[in-house]
Amino acid sequence: MQDAKQDRLPPNQRWIGHILRWNVDHPGIVPENPKVKLDSWRLTVDGVIEKPQVLNWKDLLALPTHESVSDFHCVEGWSVGDCKWSGVRFKDLAETVKPRTDAKYVFFSCTDGYTTSLELADLMEDNVILAYKLNGKFLDETTGAPLRLVVPQKYAYKSVMYVEKITFMKFRKLGYWEQRGYSDTADVWKNDRRTR
């Protein structure tokens, strides 16, 4: 069993016991986690889509729930196995908002000012989820509450926390860490960490 788990470990990663928490296990790292009130939280979905949406917390919870178990890989070199995420599959949200044929990228904006983008094709995998629970418990502020993206095949800086806006785009737009030299493709199996 241990060998099977080692086969799941991407290059230059090591297993640890739990997901490190922003501003708890990473004190002093910017951006800081925001204080989000669920009664005023909104998720805006816009861009090159047929049906723009603004969802409140109740709207989000009313969408079909999906569970996804995956490994979580940080660009710093640590990995956590068998994380059980619950939330909305990105592909199900995309089906609701109906991206136009010229939508190729998706840009994520977060409550703390953090941003990233991914190719739409990467987000349509079955295990990509907009998560509000981890291992059966609602996320807290240190793990990205109320909503975070989880893209298991990418380094965790692509699995953005505190998501508040999702914009479908025709063209690529670099996010927070990508503008600072981190890889935009962030493929864990290619050890694709930095561009410079």
Image (spheres, rainbow, N blue to C red):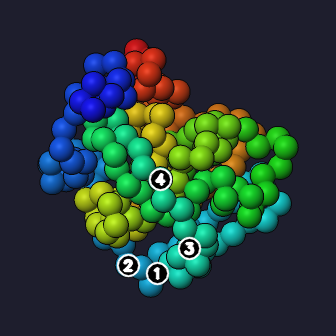
What's under tag 3, amino acid-wise?
Leu
Q: Earlier in the sequence, mark 2 or mark 4?
A: 2
Pointers 2 and 3 in contact (CB under 8 A)?
A: no
Which mark lies nearer to you, 1 or 3?
3
Q: Earlier in the sequence, mark 3 or mark 4?
A: 3
Residue picked out by circle 1: 40
Going by the image, does 71 lie left or right of 151?
left
Residue drawn where x is 70% and y is 56% of the image: 94
- Give residue 194's position: percent from left, percent from top: 40, 20
In contact (CB < 8 Å): disc 2 and disc 1: yes
Looking at the image, residue 17 lies above or below residue 85: above
Sequence-earlier tag: 4 or 1: 1
In-image side of 193 versus 97 (left or right): left
User: Do callouts 1 and 3 mark residues in contact (Cβ within 8 Å)?
Assistant: no
Which of the 4 quarters of the picture holds residue 134? Answer: bottom left
Q: What mark, if any, has residue 68 been given in the picture?
A: 4
What label does residue 37 carry, if any?
Answer: 2
Q: Quadrant of the C terminus?
A: top left
Crowding near the residue tagged with mark 1, few <14, some 14–19, many ≥20 C-alpha atoms within 10 Å: few
Label 3 secondary element: helix
Q: CA distance from mark 4 to mark 1?
A: 27 Å
**Mark 3 sits on what residue?**
60
- Identify the secondary structure beneath mark 1: loop
